[in-house]
Amino acid sequence: MTSARRMLIDANTTPFYHVINRCVRRAFLCGEDKLTGRSYEHRRGWIVDKIKALSAIFCIDICAYAVMNNHYHLVLKIDVEEAKTLSPKEVISRWCQITKGHAIATKYMNGDALIDGERMLLDGLITEWHERLSSISWFMRCLNEEIARKANREDECKGAFWEGRFKSQALLDEQALLACMMYVDLNPIRAGIADSLQSSDFTSIQERLNALSPNSITPQITKTPVDNSQPTPHKSLAKFDGATHLHRQTGIPFHFADYLELIDWTGRAIRHDKKGFIDNQRPKLLNELGIASDAWLSSAKDFRRQYSGISGRWDAMCAFKLQQGGKWCRGKSSSEALHPNQPLG
């Protein structure tokens, strides 16, 4: 039985979440339909552009992404500290970029005087919108609704475009975050559609590498009709700040150089088309976090299958499930052997 989203996402427990959404009816999010020869590659750009635009509106950062043929992965961070700094006018301004807002909010923004009843209504609206600007559920709703409308319009059809509501996993510690980000960034290599990090189109790791190389070439996509509306500001990917604790940093708690070393080592290790050579010297991050090499490679290949809704150290996963009213916990720590389903308590 599915769980309420409020039970699966709790910024006070962890700000980091892995979310996945998949197309329905054999629909193509991207890629090329071998039966008709029709290309949908341009839709990859829709996803990337939209998540960057929404990140600039919501208090949610993009840590990693991968846009595949019929699904996409995101690793998101709820920026609790940014949300705390928003003024009432900033809340209204941001929310009105994605909805029509409300006449009372418009009146307030124009500097018109409000009567007591209007003030009470406005306070309630601001509180509600403020909460939504930190909500992954609302972030995903805004993303999926627009992509579905554009795809259906292009396909000249109606009906559901997505398989169902998005799936989410809470990432409770540094090992879980690291394993998940790498799982997402290595999707094209694991699927056999790319043979290097640089050629892994429409992934966050490719974007980060391109940012290091000014002369790099951006992936080419099929052009679609021009949207004459004003361009929406985009937000860059979350930064690697090298902090040592998941909850005591403003970005991703690793150094990018260490992440790059580990993802290169991992990517070569999971290639199926050639054996390659993996240096016996383990990457720095594995040593710092105390993760066994074989357990790490297993997570890099099968992260999604190894967990159900949450990922982290066994005691942290059990505590999270108990807090949310669950009775069972399934998964494995990134540094431990796979645990079978076990009752809590």
Image: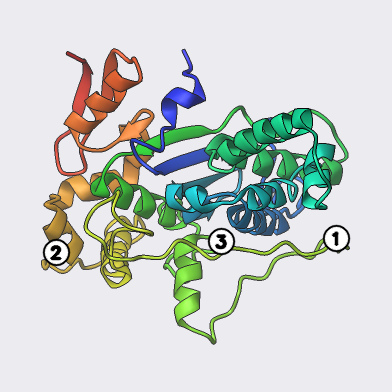
User: Which element carries disc 3, helix, strand or loop?
Assistant: loop
The residue drawn where x is 32% and y is 48% is: 177
Q: Quadrant of residue 242?
A: bottom left
Give the amino acid at mark 1. Answer: Ser
Q: Is residue 194 visible?
A: no
Give the amino acid at mark 2. Answer: Arg
Q: Which sits in the foreground, 30 or 136?
A: 136
Q: Where is mark 1, residue-wise?
A: 229
Q: Position of residue 256 (x, y in %)?
A: 32, 69
Q: How is the image coloured?
A: rainbow
Q: Quadrant of residue 329?
A: top left
Q: Position of residue 145 (x, y in %)?
A: 72, 38
Q: Is residue 93 visible?
A: yes
Q: Where is mark 2, residue-wise?
A: 282
Drawn side of residue 206 relative to residue 292, left or right:
right
The quarter of the rendered structure image containing the C terminus is top left
Q: Which sits in the foreground, 113 or 288?
A: 113
Q: Vertically, is 29 above or below 26?
A: below
Few, some or many C-alpha atoms within 10 Å of disc 3 (few <14, some 14-19, many ≥20)?
many
Q: Where is mark 3, residue-wise?
A: 202
Of the image marks 3 and 1, the number of the one nearer the N terminus = 3
Q: Position of residue 57 (x, y in %)?
A: 63, 53
The residue drawn where x is 84% and y is 48% is: 112
Drawn side of residue 209 relative to residue 136, left or right:
left
Of the image marks 2 and 3, the number of the one nearer the N terminus = 3
The label nearer to you, 2 versus 1, is 1
